[in-house]
């Protein structure tokens, strides 16, 4: 076959009932089919629902999917396993739940030896290595962490490092935007890949609960998926907003950890690596003046001074005004007018 017919290959039914005229088997799924030297006519390559030209990597029709009741759909390239990475979950009215791969930039992340981050990473590494012990005692191999602290204290940075490490273990990360959809997607993944390491991220879990309800989150955390090899990680700036059913129940979030602002030792390591400064006095000045600064504030200090040319003292004053000064309101201007202070 020298045309698109070569890409339309009949395959074993999902129910395993293979007829005499079936040309493939379930083993064909997830394998790279041999296209030979077949050329693909224009209009038979589809990428993201649109026809494209050329020999670039694209969506080829390669097999048939039996949907039941005599209905068939053309199926593109298949894989037996997901690529390691971070995924969001979206719903498509015609195709159901879909995974969308997200980009994760971890190039600038710093692991601070001896810090609370370091302790968390060691705990999680021990968890991944302990599956046989969980199985020995008849427990599902799953764990939950809740990180809380003020905005900018480094919760997201810890999550990025955890994601990076699980990807290097060939695992996958699911970003929970909708608890129900995430629950259903985990069920799907477990049917296809029963032993894959999965990390589920509930960033700003208080906002998720506000949007979707507490029961939606609890139905996921209480193990309705009956799935092993899952690590659930949640963050919040406002732990007081969470009900005890969320924060005080083992096997939902087994560990609650407060993430403080970086201490002097961490700030010193941060500025040393970011600035490449060798003079001890210079580093000590940066460390001293950034006490009670978040990672975001420390980063902006470097940006203002090194990227934008703002004098160090001016940059520090600007950021302190932003962090610790009064929040401006329009009411102040209205009050001045009433009291007669008009220009």
Image (cartoon, rainbow, N blue to C red):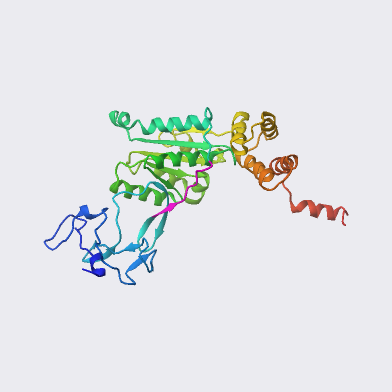
Q: Residue furthest left?
A: 20
Number of dots carrying numbers: 0
Point out residue 291 in the picture as x, y percentages from the top left corner: 67, 33
Point out residue 321 in the picture as x, y percentages from the top left corner: 73, 42
Magenta stretch, main secondary structure, is loop
Between 4 and 153, the one lying in front of the other is 4
Left or right of residue 85: residue 235: right
* Residue 324, magenta (yes or no): no
Point out residue 325 in the picture as x, y percentages from the top left corner: 73, 42
Say which residue appears at 37% left-offset and 56% top-offset: 97
Q: Is residue 244 visible?
A: no
Say which residue appears at 11% left-offset and 61% top-offset: 20
Quadrant including the C terminus: bottom right
Q: Residue furthest bottom?
A: 42
Left or right of residue 303: residue 138: left
Point out residue 3 in the picture as x, y percentages from the top left corner: 25, 70
Q: Is residue 193 visible?
A: yes
Say which residue appears at 36% left-offset and 49% top-offset: 83
Span colored in magenta: 99-108
């Amino acid at each position: 076959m020298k045309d698109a017919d070569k890409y339309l290959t009949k395959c074993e039914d999902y129910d395993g009932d293979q007829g005499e005229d079936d040309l493939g088997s379930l083993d064909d799924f997830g394998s790279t089919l041999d296209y030979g030297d077949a050329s693909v006519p224009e209009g038979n390559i589809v990428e993201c629902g649109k026809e494209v030209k050329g020999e670039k990597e694209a969506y080829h029709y390669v097999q048939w999917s039996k949907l039941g009741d005599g209905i068939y759909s053309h199926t593109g390239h298949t894989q037996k396993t997901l690529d390691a990475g971070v995924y969001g979950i979206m719903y498509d009215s015609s195709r159901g739940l879909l995974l969308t791969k997200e980009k994760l930039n971890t190039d600038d992340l710093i692991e601070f030896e001896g810090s609370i981050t370091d302790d968390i990473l060691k705990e999680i590494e021990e968890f991944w290595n302990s599956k046989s012990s969980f199985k020995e005692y008849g427990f599902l191999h799953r764990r939950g962490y809740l990180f809380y602290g003020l905005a900018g204290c480094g919760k997201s940075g810890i999550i990025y490092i955890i994601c990076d490490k699980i990807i290097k273990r060939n695992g996958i990360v699911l970003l929970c935007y909708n608890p129900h959809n995430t629950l259903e997607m985990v069920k799907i993944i477990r049917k296809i890949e029963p032993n894959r390491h999965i990390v589920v991220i509930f960033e700003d879990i208080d906002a998720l609960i506000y949007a979707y309800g507490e029961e939606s989150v609890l139905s996921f955390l209480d193990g309705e998926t009956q799935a092993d090899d899952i690590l659930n990680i949640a963050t919040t700036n406002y732990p007081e907003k969470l009900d005890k059913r969320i924060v005080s129940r083992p096997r939902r979030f087994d560990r609650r950890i407060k993430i403080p602002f970086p201490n002097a030792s961490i700030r010193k390591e941060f500025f040393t690596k970011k600035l490449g400064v060798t003079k001890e006095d210079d580093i000590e000045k940066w460390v001293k003046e950034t006490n009670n600064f978040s990672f975001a504030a420390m980063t902006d200090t470097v940006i203002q001074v090194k990227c934008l040319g703002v004098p160090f003292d001016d940059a520090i004053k600007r950021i302190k005004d932003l962090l610790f000064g009064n929040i401006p309101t329009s009411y102040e201007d209205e009050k001045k007018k009433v009291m007669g202070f008009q220009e």
